[in-house]
Image: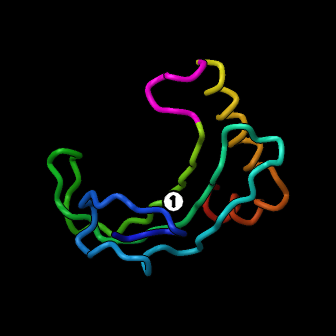
Amino acid sequence: TVEFAGVPVSRVPIFSEQLDEEMFEDPYILTIPISAKFLTRFLAAKVRGTTRSSQLFGISPGRRVTLHVIYVKTTLQPGGIDRYEDYSVFVQEIVDAMLLKANREAVQTLLP
């Protein structure tokens, strides 16, 4: 299993190259606001590769692309099990993390 900062990465075949840890450029582990109740992890990186054909996604092969990837982890459960209002708090925590001075370089580099 390929990992980025300890997080397993999906093996959806979007690149013609084999996905490995070396493909992740400018990896950042972003600082989480102290006040966060639901946001527990925030990672960001660039991934470059060559597309492979995918009729499902309408992707033609042979195109060089750069993906700016973010990963957020939360204590909230998928499917609306938690209080609906908590999801808006979680989204605000992501925004608050992006606004932290400690995360400025990552945001300006990877999330322009």
Which residue appears at 27% of the width and 67% of the height? 15
Q: Residues within 10 Å of mark 1 (few under 14, many from 20)?
A: some
Q: Quadrant of residue 75?
A: top right
Q: For this view, does 59 lie left or right of residue 75?
A: left
Q: Quadrant of residue 66?
A: bottom left
Which residue appears at 69% of the width and 64% of the height? 106
Q: Quickly name the residue at label 1.
A: 68
Which residue appears at 58% of the width and 61% of the height? 44
Q: For this view, does 104 lie left or right of residue 65?
A: right
Task: Find residue 39 and report its horizontal and vertical position in percent.
Answer: 66, 43
Amino acid at circle 1: His
Task: Find residue 57 and report its horizontal and vertical position in percent.
Answer: 23, 46
Q: Quarter holding the C terminus?
A: bottom right
Query: Residue 3 versus residue 97: which sits nearer the camera?
Result: 3
Counting labels gives 1
Relative to 103, residue 98 above or below: above
- The residue sitting at the top extreme is 84
Majority SS type along the magenta span? loop
Which residue appears at 53% of the width and 53% of the height? 71
Task: Find residue 8 and report its horizontal and vertical position in percent.
Answer: 42, 62
Q: Identify the magenta region.
A: 76-83
Relative to 75, residue 25 above or below: below
